[in-house]
Amino acid sequence: MTVKEHPYPEEVGRVMYEKDLNAHHSGIRLLEVRQGFAIVSMSIECRMLNGHGICHGGILFNLADTAFSYACNSRNLISVAQHCSISFLMPVNLGDHLTATAQENQLNGKNGIYDIEAKNQEGVTVALFRGHSRTIRGQVIETGEDHE
C-alpha cells in the first residue's frame, strides 16, 4: 500500500465530525486534529451516571474511542478499531469536564496503535485507553486516488 499523506488532517477531522452523530449526541466536541493526533472533550451530565452515582465506564470508553477514531483517520484513509482496552484510574463525577488526547504510537502498513489519555478539568488522568486500528478500503474525503 502506498500511503500519500493527506495535507489537511484538520479538514478530514471536520468532515468526519459533521457526520459523527454519536459525538454530537454524546456532547463530544472535537478540539484538534493533526496527523496521528486528536483532542476531544465532553462534560459529564446526569444522564451519564451509573448506579453508583459516578460516570459510567462506557461513557469514558466512548470519549477515548472517539479521540482514537479521529487520530487514526487523520491521514484520510478509513481506519477502524481492531482492538481496544481501557484502564479506569479514578472515578469521574457529575460536572467534570474531560479531555481525551490521542497520540499515534506505531503505524506499520495497515495497522496502527494509539494511546489515549483522558484527563479531568484539574489535569488528573482518569483513564488510559489503547486502540489498535486497521486501515480498510476508502477515504474520508474522496480524492480519487487508490491507496490499496
Image (cartoon, rainbow, N blue to C red):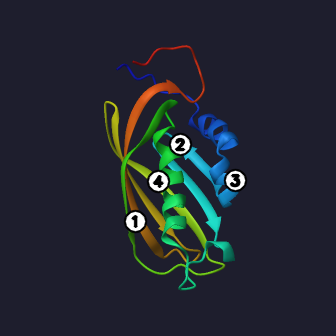
Badge 1: how crowded within 10 Å, few (<14), some, or many (20+)? Answer: many
Q: Which residue is mark 4?
A: 102
In this view, the mark in front (1 or 2):
1
Residue 22 horizontal/vertical position (percent): 63, 51
N-terminal label among 3 and 2: 3
Name the image quarter holding the N terminus: top left
User: Which residue is labeled 3 in the image?
Assistant: 24
- Residue 19 on image: x %, y %: 67, 40
Q: Residue furthest bottom?
A: 52
Q: CA distance from mark 1 to mark 4?
A: 10 Å
What's the distance in space between the residues labelled 1 and 2, CA to CA? 20 Å
Contact (CB < 8 A) between labels 2 and 4?
Answer: no
Q: Secondary structure at mark 1?
A: strand
Amino acid type at mark 2: Arg
Note whether residue 45 is visible: no
Between label 2 and label 4, give the one nearer the viewer.
4
Q: CA distance from mark 3 to mark 2?
A: 20 Å
Check disc 2 and report the residue beneath it: 34
Residue ID for mark 1 = 128
